[in-house]
Amino acid sequence: MNRYFREISVTVALGLVLLVMAACAPSFYQAQPLLSLITREAPTLVVMCGMALIIISRQIDISVGSQFSVCSIGAGLLAARGWPLVAVLPAAMMMGAGLGAFNGWLIAGLRLPSIVVTLATMVMLRQGLNLLQQGAFVNLPDNVQWFGLSQTTGQWTLVGTALSLLLGCGFFMRHVAAGRWVYAVGTDAEAARLAGIRPQWVTFLVFVFVGALTGLAATMNLVQSPQIQPLVGSGLELKVIAAVVVGGVAISGGRGNVWGAFAGLLLLACVSPALTHLHVEAYWEKAIQGMIILLAVVADGLRQRGLKGGHG
Amino acid sequence: MNHHVSRCLLFATLLLAGLPAVFAAEAKLMIAMMPKSKGNAYFISCKHGADRAAKELGFELLFDGPTDSNAAKQNEIVENWITLGVDVITVAAENKQGISTALRKAQKQGIKVITFDADALPDARSFFVNQATPQGIASGLMDEAARLCGAEGEFAIISATLTAGNQREWLKYIDERLAEKYPKMKLVAVRPCDDLKDKAQSEATALMSANPRLKLLMAICSPGVPGAAEAVKQAGKTGQVKVIGLGLPSENRRYVHEGVTDSVMLWKTEDLGYLTIYAAAAVARDELKPGATSFKAGSLGTFEIKGDNILLGQPFIFNRSNIDQFDF
């Protein structure tokens, strides 16, 4: 079977959905609504790049949604105090990197399992935020939305930023030694260590990186509306993990790339607006997304069996 | 040695298990209050009223709930409160059937149960503090929508989740009102936003492009209203697609002033929390019993009781003329 079978099959599935929409509901392709919908997914794409790295390194981070909320509200409060965006953005990224470093220290430093650590930080951060913010929206100054630019320019800036980051991550993971280390650690940490890589440092840095990306994503979301809801980002972790898994990144680490994950994200994000355009009841939305995830996992399972049976 | 350790552990466990009971017996009455989701500004506003009432009455108030709208998590919290031995549990039920088993169990343990905002099954609680009857809310919203659309044309609804009991009930009565009074209006879609403003915005964007003749978006959960308004604004359809819904004045003030959102309906949420705690206290002290037809709640005065529903009264419409008078 082709090495990129999973990536190709997701892209084909996405292509099919887009074709069906072109045939059945051409109104799906109106420029303004489509750009608005894509812009809404841009921050998700940024977090997804981080999640792909985490899962490739054979870890998981389910606290990204909570980190996203904390960074959003933190950045929002700074912006509301009159901080300019050029200062808010690095502050949010530092906040995220700090939260990521805490996760990374517990996981790589103390060697605790990432699912438990990030489950704990997910709940802690979310509850802490609820306690502090009490559910109140943060109202932002007028010049924050779209960086004070026109709406279309702002939207293209965000989409462009997210896509460049995707390109950067794709290049880094394929052609830069440090990117290959992430694969090595995810495939076999002990072998990586024997090859001279320090797996604990790689793991730690990957968590710091995803934290910083989450801070960036939170700022990219902040500039899209004049107010921020503290619940923002809840469920984001599931969305990005699903995208990464659907996109062919093996949950057992060491395999996959951000391109597949990107196709997975688009496929899952298509479901809801596609159903709206096809006038299908909303009950189907989560069922279909669930089915896509299940199909992906089954495909992975079959592929692994095929590898063992065929070449073992 | 091992034996000794395990005995110590057993002792410690017993001690810990016994502690809450000892404290509960000595402390003042404890009222537990559970929102559908505690990060939601709507429920936070309820809590402000509840805090005030608890202070006036000298009760202890426990406020806890899921961080997102999660029915299973609500059951868990009720179970914890049963173990803790609280005196009264007040709940805004995410799922009518789901929560009722846990609430009946609480009643069996002698804990009084009251629901507010969203009801459980009638046998699982003694009273429901009804912020407005579902008919009142549904016809209020539908009439406002019809008024803005000239009683004809397409509209769509954004709800919190598809399973939430009160949302389903409102939808049912909106449908009834629609069939009965506004035959020229058409409900084209109902989309859930999971209580997230951002998702509401995406849903509203897709709804507008999929239904080019859409005249109005109606959000029946509070984060949905600003979400829909932002979508309309970004689509450049201010005035062309009207926005109404149930929501807080503070979250919608900007859009109401910009003319994107026409009107926001809500009861006074602080009063709902306040009334709930007063009712809970009265039930705990056996002052409020089935069959009562009215009830006096501190500084808010007397409320009507219909069957086992304590009625807060008619919903209130906020619009450009009055929204600045309210700061919640």
Image (tube, coloured by chain):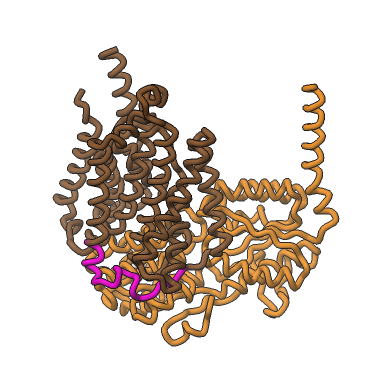
Rendering coords of residue B187 (x, y %): 33, 64
| A309 relative to B303 in the view: left or right | left
| B278 relative to B150 in the view: left or right | right
Look at 56% across and 62% down and name the residue there.
A132
Whether residue A140 is situated above or below residue B90 in the rendered picture: below
Whether residue B207 is situated above or below residue A117 in the rendered picture: below
Judged from this view, the residue extending furthest toward the front is A196
Q: Which residues, given as a range, are shown in magenta?
A: A138-156
Whether residue B142 is situated above or below residue B286 in the rendered picture: below
Can residue B306 be seen here? The reply is no
Image quarter (top left, top right, bottom left or bottom right) of the N terminus of chain B? top right
Look at 68% across and 59% down and name the residue there.
B62
Q: Determine if the magenta segment contains residue B292.
A: no
Rendering coords of residue B56 (x, y %): 75, 73
Judged from this view, the residue extending furthest toward the top is A312
Q: How many marks?
A: 0
| B118 relative to A294 in the view: left or right | right
> What hue represents chain B?
orange
Look at 64% across and 63% down and name the residue there.
B128
Judged from this view, the residue extending furthest toward the right is B26
Image quarter (top left, top right, bottom left or bottom right) of the C terminus of chain B? bottom right
Q: Which chain is painted in brown? A: A
Can residue B215 be seen here? The reply is yes
> Image quadrant of residue A32?
bottom left
The residue lying toward the viewer, choosing from A123 and A18, is A123
Look at 57% across and 64% down and name the residue there.
B117
Whether residue B195 is situated above or below residue A144 in the rendered picture: above
> Image quadrant of residue A151?
bottom left
Rendering coords of residue B180 (x, y %): 40, 70
Judged from this view, the residue extending furthest toward the left is A23
Rendering coords of residue A130 (x, y %): 55, 59
